[in-house]
Amino acid sequence: MAHLELFVLTWGVYPRRVLIYLHEKGLLNSPHIRVTPVTLSPAIEMLAPGKPKGTVPILALPDGTFIKQSVAILDYFEDICDNPQEEWQKDIATSAKASMRGTDARERATTRDILALADEAGSMFGFACHKGTKLFQKMEPSSPVAASLAMGIVRKNMKLLEPYYEGRFRGGNHDAERVTIADCVLCSLLQFSRELYGVDLLADPELVNLKGFYGTFKERDSAKIPEDFYPGYIKELASVWLE
């Protein structure tokens, strides 16, 4: 019996954070977690039986309440794996891999550092997409200037993230790399920006460590995507940036 239901848009940047995480954590096929894809209505409303209004991801809990922010969902899963209380939580924890926030205070602080920068970059990139691409031109006011300013923050954060990945995801045994929740969040953003919106956030030649990270992580089973992963009609509009 599934005790948790996760509503997702499988190709959306925020749901992808959680789906990549669940795969890396070893929980994607847990019998206690039901993953329910939503459909998009003509009005771009995300629909699924039992889903409350709002964007995804949304995690439905056994008591009828919901968690509606991707980072909070990641923390929820980490918390129940670290300190399970109910029997079904203990069952999840037994099959889960090690902590993806870090094993000591320093590691956890570093994960929070990276997560904060990646999350802010994701928010700013989303704002830039809404204000600067053809995809949203008929839905809300456009502003290429505002989009450009937001992209400046995104690129600044990429530079701030660069030193955190020095020495990581290098060498031959990538499966031995300890993946964190922050890695899942960052990979989702880099993949989404490049493959859907046609924007390479790592174009700066100085971002050597991040390029190494993404080049390796996108080939992991958790992050691999087929060529037709993103809907063609959306990709066609998303890749057109206004001037």
Image (cartoon, rainbow, N blue to C red):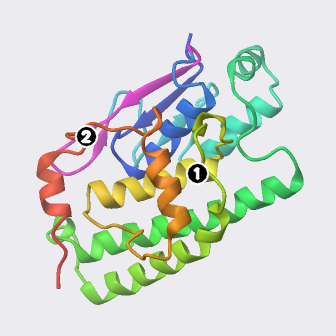
Residue 83, image quadrant: top right
32 or 29, nearer to the observer: 29
| Distance (Cα) linking label 2 and label 1 | 21 Å
Query: Are the residues flagged by discs 2 and 1 in contact, CB closer than 8 Å?
Result: no
Residue, far top: 1
- Whether 51 is among the magenta residues is no
Choose between 151 and 166: the one closer to the eye.
Answer: 166
Q: Quadrant of residue 152?
A: bottom left
Count up the numbered dots. Answer: 2
Which residue in the structure is indicated by mark 1?
Answer: 183
- Rendered location of residue 76, percent (x, y): 68, 40
**Amino acid of disc 2:** Phe
Residue stretch in magenta: 31-47
Q: x and y percent of residue 87 in the render?
A: 77, 14
* For residue 107, above or below residue 91: below
Task: Please state if 105 lies on the left or on the right of 169 as rendered.
Answer: right
Q: Residue at x 25, y 77 (%)?
A: 132
